[in-house]
């Protein structure tokens, strides 16, 4: 019994059971290893409270202990989600150190970041911030129980990780040598595409029925964080469209919405500049090609354009464009095309706009109607 027995979503009239992320596995394994090392506690399961608020009871295996170290594993269970990491064993080795504090790193089978623009800096293990925080919290809890005040090093490894990573987008993202340790909620929720779109529709309808004429939309958490940190907009009123830009626009037209302002990382919305309305990488990528084409329009050298075509992340491509001092004109080209395709999708029946940013370069540009839409949103939510 893992604690997920009563959690599921519905797909094609079938129950799709929840699972838990590689981040939860890593945190559970680290907690078990710390318990074995500091408390000499050997347990078949380890409890873990996820960020989603679901208490897990994770089966622990492969317990080992040596002088000043211990290691345990938790096997990934993705539930009914088609996840390539399902069944992988995630190991955590916890070692005593002379230096104070808890250091978290990746070992064999955990990827290393080699390109800028990702959540973790170049050279770091591909263990994202929420899993890192989960690992830190669980290990600190054991240290407190054991009255241990020394240092610890936690190394996460995945023996089958390097082989599995070939089937992920990690190689294209510049993450080498293994999988990423991921998860923002700690829980894997399998949902069909139709169910995701339906959830967007439900949220939009709720906003419209509560009087919203203008919508603030982000593809995901990066957009929300950017609004909160850099824009005088009611970030708490945003709704997420995931990859479904086109469907979001279609629904807004049907519901009589008067305007939508998208706030997006360029890695997603650069695709809209080519009329791509589903931004998931399995449907279309072409980020480098779109950036290169618009850089050519702005006057970049052929050498620079070729270099953009060889980039993996949008931030890497933007660095090439900035080197030739063309960032502003290229963003003008992009935002004009984004504005065209947003309006084209809606047949001009509502006001549309977008603001683009990147993790490394910050604010990049916006469409002509963005400021007007921002003002309408502030008035709508009483933020003026």
Image (spheres, grey):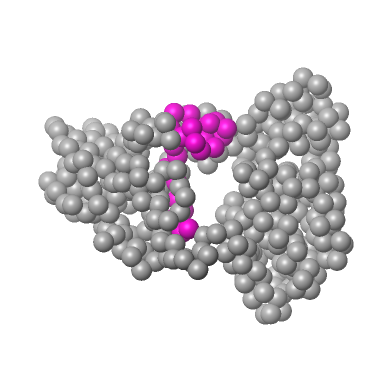
Q: Is residue 179 magenta?
A: yes
In the displayed structure image, the side of residue 79 where residue 302 appears, left or right: right
Residue closest to the eye, 352 or 62: 62
- Which corner quadrant of the image does residue 207 belong to? bottom right
Residue closest to the eye, 124 or 267: 267
Q: Which residues are magenta?
A: 165-190
Q: Position of residue 266 (x, y in %)?
A: 69, 44
Q: Above or below — where is 73 with respect to 6? A: above
Residue found at x 65% / y 28%: 311
Residue found at x 74% / y 33%: 289
Residue 190 visible in rendering: yes
Q: Is residue 170 magenta?
A: yes
Q: Above or below — where is 250 with respect to 267? A: below
Q: Position of residue 233 (x, y in %)?
A: 68, 63
Q: Position of residue 312 (x, y in %)?
A: 62, 31
Image quarter hosting the N terminus: bottom left
Q: Position of residue 74 (x, y in %)?
A: 29, 46
């Amino acid at each position: 019994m893992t604690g997920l027995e009563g959690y599921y979503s519905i797909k094609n009239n079938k129950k799709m059971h929840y699972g838990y992320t590689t981040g939860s596995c890593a945190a559970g394994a680290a907690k078990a290893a710390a318990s074995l090392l500091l408390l000499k506690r050997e347990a078949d399961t380890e409890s873990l409270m996820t960020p989603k608020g679901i208490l897990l009871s994770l089966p622990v295996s492969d317990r080992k202990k040596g002088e000043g170290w211990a290691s345990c594993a938790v096997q990934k269970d993705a539930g009914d989600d088609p996840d390539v990491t399902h069944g992988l064993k995630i190991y955590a080795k916890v070692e005593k150190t002379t230096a104070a504090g808890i250091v978290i790193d990746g070992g064999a089978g955990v990827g290393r970041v080699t390109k800028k623009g990702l959540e973790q800096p170049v050279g770091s293990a591909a263990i994202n911030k929420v899993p890192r925080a989960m690992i830190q919290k669980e290990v600190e809890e054991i240290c407190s129980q054991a009255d241990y005040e020394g240092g610890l090093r936690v190394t996460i490894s995945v023996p089958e990780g390097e082989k599995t990573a070939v089937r992920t987008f990690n190689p294209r993202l510049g993450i080498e040598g293994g999988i990423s340790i991921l998860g923002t909620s700690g829980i894997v929720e399998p949902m069909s595409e139709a169910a995701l779109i339906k959830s967007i529709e439900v949220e939009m309808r709720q906003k419209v029925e509560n009087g919203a004429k203008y919508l603030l939309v982000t593809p995901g958490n990066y957009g929300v964080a950017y609004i909160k940190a850099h824009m005088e907009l009611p970030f708490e009123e945003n709704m997420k469209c995931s990859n479904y830009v086109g469907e979001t626009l279609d629904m807004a037209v049907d519901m009589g919405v008067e305007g939508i302002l998208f706030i997006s990382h360029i890695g997603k919305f650069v695709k809209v500049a080519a009329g791509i309305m589903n931004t998931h990488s399995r449907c279309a990528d072409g980020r480098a090609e779109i950036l290169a084409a618009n850089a050519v329009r702005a006057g970049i050298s052929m050498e620079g354009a070729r270099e953009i075509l060889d980039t993996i992340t949008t931030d890497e491509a933007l660095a090439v464009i900035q080197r030739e001092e063309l960032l502003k004109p290229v963003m003008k080209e992009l935002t004009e095309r984004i504005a065209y395709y947003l309006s084209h999708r809606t047949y001009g029946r509502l006001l549309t706009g977008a603001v683009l940013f990147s993790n490394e370069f910050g604010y990049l540009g916006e469409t002509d109607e963005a400021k007007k839409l921002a003002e309408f949103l502030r008035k709508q939510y009483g933020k003026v």
